[in-house]
Image: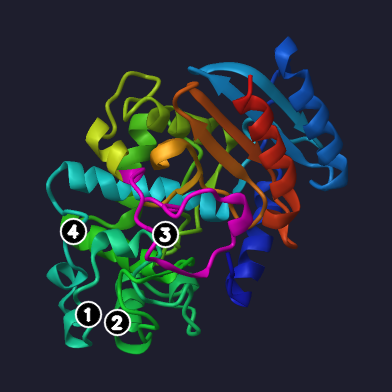
Amino acid sequence: MKVHLHCYLLCCFTAVLLAGCSKTESKTIIAPEYNDVDQVLTEAATSKFGGKCYGIIQVDGKTVYAKGFGGYDGSTRQLIASCSKWLSAAILMSLVDEGKMKLTDSVGKFLPIFTTYHKGGITIAQLFSHTSGFPGNSTQGYETNVLSTLSAAADGIAKNVALQYTPGSTFYYGGVSMQVAGRVCEVASGKDWKTLATEKLFTPCGMTSTSFGLTANPQIGGGATSTPDDYMRFLYMIMNKGVAANGTRVLSEAAVTAMEQPQTSSTTTIAYSPYPLSLLTTKGIYGIGNWRDVTGPGDVLIENSSPGLFGSHPWINRDKKVTGFIFTFIVDNGYLTTLPACIKIRNLVRNK
């Protein structure tokens, strides 16, 4: 979850502007059996979250816990960093549903420049599971340059970012490969990324306060802004196997299943993972744009998630129909600062 300096400074400035976007106070809801969750989050809000966060948990779409601290509520809008990866994966899968691409397709099929530079055999699945062979982020900052375009960024990556590993062999978390995948989506669909995001995900899910910003080079793996209420609409859709709360089918059940299949295995080398490996019980740690961070016997998925650099932490437990989001914005080491409290809350909820 590394970030280049110019993007970091822009994110901080934007976050200041967005911090005042909360317009209404959300109602506090604490079901009796969630008093233990409230105790953990209340303590962590002061000690770990800088006094500002919002937690919401739903069971089958019904809110059983919702509480804000420091003025945060369900409509507070902030940068969500790598929580964006889950959103972007769903946008990509909408094109798979439409037959415009397959996860097994090569990048060279859509972007011949990658074939020219001997990188054309990387698959779409590898691009979106950190197994492409690229470094996590480019030293040139192609994936975070807001003054560029997605087309120019992809071309720069093809020409100037060397593969560090054989595609499919190694997991190295980051954003550069997802930037390439975003450009593939543009070419395959004939539409720019922001239009795709709006048409394929935000509008059908009713996500009116989520976007990838104004730049022509949206950061596919980390550039979205959203609110807790909006992101929960997305989580419900994924938990509900592709059908949004408003009844709209956004993704096929097969697409959601494909997103959650492991793209890593016992033969995959883990070169870099921001998620502490000691907390993961499976070799199949990552799917398409989401962590498979709690699994059972036979590598059966129990919970998946997509935490962000600034500390926000969404997750799903489909068997229990639980969706949850701990939402915050902490510039300095937010992810690792908030992770223990988020994991503790998830454990409490899972065991109810």
Mark 1 — residue?
114
Q: Would you say the residues marked 3 and 4 are in contact, meaning their CB atoms lie under 8 Å apart?
A: no
Compare marks 1 and 3 and give the one earlier in the sequence: 1
Q: Would you say the residues marked 2 and 1 are in contact, meaning their CB atoms lie under 8 Å apart?
A: yes
- Given this view, does label 1 or label 4 mark the residue nearer the observer? 4
Mark 3 — residue?
220
Element marked by disc 3: loop
- The residue depicted at 68 percent of the width and 23 percent of the height is 66
Compare marks 2 and 1 and give the one earlier in the sequence: 1
Q: Which residue is situated farthest in the front direction here?
A: 297
Observer-nearest residue: 165 or 333? 165
Q: Give amino acid for label 1.
A: Phe
- The residue depicted at 82 percent of the width and 40 percent of the height is 44
Q: Would you say the residues marked 2 and 3 are in contact, meaning their CB atoms lie under 8 Å apart?
A: no
Q: Give amino acid for label 4.
A: Thr
- Given this view, does label 4 or label 2 mark the residue nearer the observer? 4
Mark 2 — residue?
158
Mark 4 — residue?
104
Q: Residues within 10 Å of mark 1 (few under 14, many from 20)?
A: many
Query: Which residues lie in the magenta part?
Result: 259-287
- Given this view, does label 3 or label 4 mark the residue nearer the observer? 4
